[in-house]
Amino acid sequence: MKYIVYKTTNKVNNYIYIGVHKTAYPNKFDGYLGCGVRINKPSTYEKGKTAFQIAVKTFGLSNFYRETLAIFDTEQDAYLLEELLVNEE
């Protein structure tokens, strides 16, 4: 398994979400947008509890896209990069 650091962008308001995701296929989009949201499982966002889940329900899946920023062999390395990238802005 690999760990990716990704950025998911809301195309409507340009808000971004940066996170870490564990995947067997780091160079292939597996449907994971972030914060537990999977594009093929409406139950992961239809009754959203987090701001990101609510945004996906509000704006719709088609208004979000995910980019892989980096691929790591270890979870620790992935979280170190995430920590460097995430800020209040």
Image (spheres, rainbow, N blue to C red):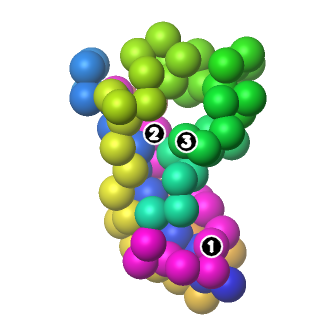
Compared to 27, does 80 lie above or below? Answer: above
Q: Nearer the viewer, residue 69 or 33?
A: 33
**Foreground: disc 1 or disc 3:** 3
Report crowding for label 1: few under 14, some 14 to 19, many 20 or more residues within 10 A (C-alpha): some
Disc 2 designates what residue?
17
Q: In the rendered structure, does residue 49 fall within the stretch colored magenta? A: no
| Residue drawn at (35%, 31%) of the image | 62
- Amino acid type assigned to the residue bearing label 3 in the image: Ile
Provide the residue designation for mark 3.
39
Residue type at mark 2 is Tyr
Which residue is labeled 1 in the image?
23
Q: Residue furthest top?
A: 58
Residue 37 x %, y %: 62, 39
Task: Point out the tag, 1 or 2, that comes first from the N-terminus.
Answer: 2
Which SS class for mark 2? Answer: strand
Which circle, 3 or 2, is nearer the viewer?
A: 3
Residue at 55% x, 41% y is 39
Q: Which residues are magenta?
A: 15-28
